[in-house]
Amino acid sequence: MIETVSAAPPKRRRGWTRKEWHYFWLGLVFASPWIIGFLVFTVYPFFSSLYFSLTEYDLFNPPKWVGMDNYAAIMKDRNFYKSISNTLFMAFISVPVTLFSSLLIALLLNFKVKGIRYYRTIFYLPAVIPGVASALLWTWMLNPDFGLVNIFLRWAHLPDPAWLLDPRFTKPSLILMGLWGSGAGALIFLAALQGVPQTYYEAAQVDGANWWHRFWRITVPALSPIILFQLIMGLIGAFQIFTESYILAGGKSSGGALGGPGQSLLFYAVNLYQEAFINLKMGYASALAWILFVIVMLITLLVLKTSKRWVYYGGE
Amino acid sequence: MLRKGSTWGLIMVFLLAAVLSGCGGGKDSAASGQEGGEAAKGGDAPKEKVQLSFWYGWTGPEAEALEKLIKKWNDANPDIQVKGLSQSDYQKQLTAITGGNPPDVASNFGQDVVPWGERGAMMPLDDFIRKDNVDLGDFVPAALSSSQASGKTYALPIAMHVSMLFYNKELLEKAGFSGPPETMGQLKEYITKLSIKEDGGKLQQLGLWPGVDAYTFSYAYGGSYYDADKKQVTPDDAGVKKAVEFGKGIWDQFGSKELDRFASGLGQYMSPQNPFFTGKYAMTIDGEWLPTFIKQYAPNLKYGIAPIPYDESKPDLKDPGNVTTSVFYIPKGVKHPEESWKFLKWMADPEQMAEFTAAIGNLPTRTSLQTHESYKEVPGFQEFLKYSSSPNLHSFPATSFSTEYMTEFSNQYNAILRGDVGLDEGLKRVKDKIQPLVK
């Protein structure tokens, strides 16, 4: 065995030359700000939160080891299930809806019409506005009495819901707000759309493919890696949704209880924040964070696994 | 060349490392530099000058009133200079305390005191209080009790809030009432008569918003949330239950759908569109700051202030109320506890307390101030000052778990109102969740 290995064409010489070592260290030195930052601000908190999740810790007294107690308590916590179901609603409804609308906007912005650059800018603008500002803006848009949305609905003789006050409409309100920001996703789709070789379309046209066929057989497969990317980022974002709920169903104004009417906006991250910074249960909150980590990882893995069947990479 | 390049690389890294590590130390050196500089300026002072930082939650005109007091202190105490910082996010205090770099004195809500204090975030003040003979007997008992647990005082209440019944005189007259309701039974009758539906059952005017304040009504029914002797949380206490039933009764009279629709048309609280100012609410339960707001936003409103109604079968529980407080405390780990205390004590002295609370339209926590002349000009204060000496005022029991208790109670109260859960089951859920936290 050893003979054959040494007899094989030397892909790599044994050991590095001085010069190569030199470059190796130099590279490490240049990368060190990131490496140090990664170790101190990511790896260390990562593992310490795992440790804290097995303790009872209130920030002020030394953590007390409690083993799996936090995890057992979470399994019996009503707020945990409420927050999971609210969050899953957002992940499974909001993410596909936003994805679809981004794609639609991208397709529209891909037309070569006059002034398309301005349209592109306008659709991207909402993505530049900070989350807090846009949440505040939307509280006005969705004001049931004099908000623009309901003025329009009343004009069209459609039902005008109480949006952010009615537990049945709070999450749809958030989805609506998310749609407003789909320009960010559209920009990425647009970039990908412009990378699809025109020759494919020309060839398809010669073969007599109609608009739908060209979209379904060329555009979608060509965009599939981007769809996958946006889907995963969207899912991760949905599991961490916090700002909108915190601003719209505010903590201070509602006497400390977060989560909005009927706890309909009690999302996973909101519940976690409440346990950590209001109830001062850092251990419990760390355990919640780890459960979230596992859930997001499992869902991401699942998506990646199924993606083999529907994602096409160029050249395959 | 290469050697030169790597040297530069190393220099860069060291520079970066210095900058990064400097972030932590930078503040200290800057602060000490400042202190040193000022000490040098006031070279005549016999003692070394101390600089205290004071974080408070008030903003705008209320913060200005506080800054005026700080200036007064600074002028009188050249050796202890206080620097105020308006910081209304109280979670930041937590981070500062755990980070070992806390403010020297800070304000907070009374309901946070015992949860934070029992965990060691606040310094017990009892030794100072004993040494300086601060008369705790002068403080309103319900206000002081929210800062105390297990024989320790973690903060001094600087201002207190209590709710009373506000009523719109014109609307009451229109409905044929000559005065405000006095008992809970009358209140119920008033609410029904003062709620007006039009256009096929659309609510136009509401007697009293049913979801408002279960705590206040609990005390009207003689309820209690905690049995300290038995170490039992009692959300299922008969009085508490009656208060929840009362809210539920009004709620069901109109239903969630109609109330949501009605609520959706209501204006901002701090604006002329406040539903009580516009007559959408005929009555409301609100605090001592409301008359000041009315003067500002709805000067023509004809309103009255009345005691919270009481349970007719328990006349000894007249003038009930739920007290909440704003407090000053000294965080754990401060560098100059003696000086922090001196400033805190001075702020809580009758003179300063009167000046501050009158300026921001809050109630003083000292009984000796209830007749103080500085409140003469504050609208509505004659009623409220008198009310704040009622023996039937209570504050939510101060325990290490009271924050969670109140959150869970308010969640379940809302679920009960909306019919998501039955009354007994909802209150049982509170008990099941909170009782295990009792130690």
Image: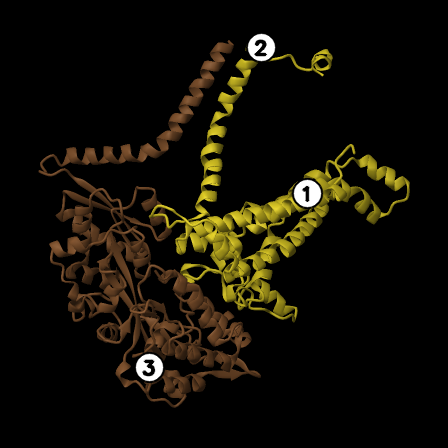
Chain colours: A yellow, B brown
The residue that label 2 is drawn on is A17
Please state which amino acid type lies under the numbered disc 3. Pro
Depth check, front residue: B320 or A97:
B320
| Quadrant including the C terminus of chain A | top right
Q: Secondary structure at mark 1?
A: helix
User: How far across and down, in percent of the image, does residue B308 sit?
Assistant: 32, 79
At x 9% / y 36%, what residue is drawn?
B44
Sort mark 1 into few (<14), some (14-19) or many (20+) by Cα contacts within 10 Å: some
Disc marking residue A304: 1
Q: Secondary structure at mark 3?
A: loop
Please state which amino acid type lies under the numbered disc 1. Leu
Depth check, front residue: A216 or B170:
A216
Does A164 sit above or below residue B253? Answer: above
Mark 3 or 1, which is nearer the eye? 1
State the CA–CA distance, disc 3 to disc 1.
Answer: 63 Å
Q: Chain of mark 1?
A: A
Q: Secondary structure at mark 2?
A: loop
State the CA–CA distance, disc 1 to disc 2.
Answer: 40 Å
Q: Is residue B138 left or right of residue B260?
A: left
The residue that label 3 is drawn on is B309
Q: Chain of mark 2?
A: A
Specify which label sits upstream in the sequence, 1 or 2: 2
Depth check, front residue: A187 or B298:
A187
Q: Chain of mark 3?
A: B
Mark 2 or 3, which is nearer the eye? 2
